[in-house]
Image (cartoon, grey):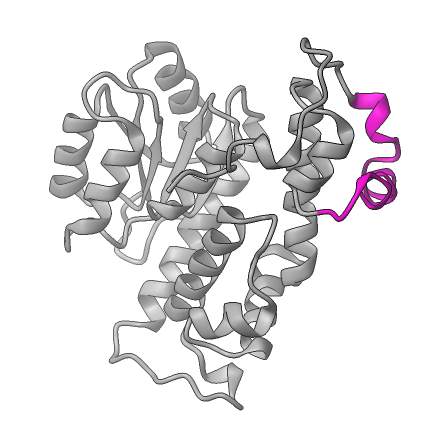
Amino acid sequence: MSTDPSGFLETVLIIDDEPDNLHLAFEILRDQGLEILCARDGTDGLRLAAELAPDLILLDIRMPDLNGFDVCARLKSLPATRDIPVIFLSALDQFEDKAQGFAQGGVDYITKPFDARELCLRVTHQIRLARRVTGITDAAPVAVEQDEPDEVPLRRWLSIFVKARTVLLTDLVDPPDIAALARACGTNRTTLQRIFQEHLGMGVAGFLREQRLQHAHQLLLRGEHRVEDIAHLVGYSGSHELRRAFKQRFGRLPSDVFRHPRDSDPVRPDSLEPLVRA
C-alpha cells in the first residue's frame, strides 16, 4: 500500500473487544504497509477516530459498552468523522445484521472468520476510493443532470450507491422498480445502473438477484423453513422459480442444501416474521 501525498502511511483503526481478533487483523494489515490503530471498545474507538482521523475504520458489532451499529451511527453524525469509511467486521452473518450495517452508513461488511486476502483487498479498495472522493469533491457539489450521468461527482455516486443498496436489502420481497428506486435516491435509471456496474460489476437487477439467492442459501442451511416458504421469503413467486435460479447460480438444487426443519408442521408464508423489523 502506498503512502498518501503527504508522505504518511495510510491509517486503519480497528475497533474490536476481542484481543485475538485485534491481533490477527493488525498483523494482516500491517504487512500491507498500513499504520494500524487499535481500540478495545466503542468509546475508545470514537475518541481515537475523532483525534486521529484514520483513513478507514474496521468495526466489530458485538462489544460491551457500545455495539458497532451505535458506534457507526455516532461516527456518521459527527462532522470530524462522518466521511471516514467504515467496514463492519463481524461474526454476525444474518441478512438483518448486514442490512442494518449498511443502513447505519457502513460501506462494506465482512464476516468472520475472514480470508486474509479478501480483507486486504476490501480495505485497500475502500481507502483508494475514499482518496479519490476527497480529491474530486472538495469543490462545491454539482447538480445531477438527468441526461448527463458522466457529470455526477464521485462522492454523490457513492452516496447514491449506499442508499440504493440499503433500500434493496431492506425489502428483498417487494423492492421498488428501478425507476422508483432511482427517484428515491435523487437520480435517474441510467445513472443508477452505471453506479452499480462501477461498484459491483453488475446492474441493479443482478445485485437484487444475487442477494435473494445468497439469503435463500442461508435460510436453507438454517433449515427453519421449507423450500416453498423460502422462495416467498426472498421474493420469488414459487419454489420452481427459486430452484431454476438457484441451480443456475450455485450449480445445485435447493434440496441439496436444505436441512430439514425441526418442526414437521408446514410453515405458512403469511405467518413468518418480516426479514427486517422497523
Residue 70 vs residue 269: left or right? Answer: left
For the point 38% across and 45% down, the residue is 106
Q: Position of residue 201 (x, y in %)?
A: 66, 58
Residue 39 shows in this picture:
yes
Residue 1 shows in this picture:
no
Q: Position of residue 274 (x, y in %)?
A: 51, 37
Q: Position of residue 51 (x, y in %)?
A: 11, 40
For the point 23% across and 49% down, the residue is 76
For the point 82% across and 36% down, the residue is 250
Residue 10 position (above or below residue 227): below
- Where is the N terminus found, in terms of image quarters? top left
For the point 40% across and 16% down, the residue is 21
Residue 226 position (above or below residue 216): above
Q: Quadrant of residue 49?
A: top left
- Where is the C terminus found, in terms of image quarters? top left
- Magenta-drawn stretch contains 242: yes
Q: Which residues are magenta?
A: 236-257
- 277 or 29: nearer the eye? 277
- Magenta-drawn stretch contains 155: no
- 171 or 197: nearer the eye? 171
Predominant SS along the magenta part: helix
Q: Quadrant of residue 176?
A: bottom right
Q: Position of residue 154 (x, y in %)?
A: 42, 69
Residue 117 position (above or below residue 145): above
Residue 105 vs residue 203: left or right? Answer: left
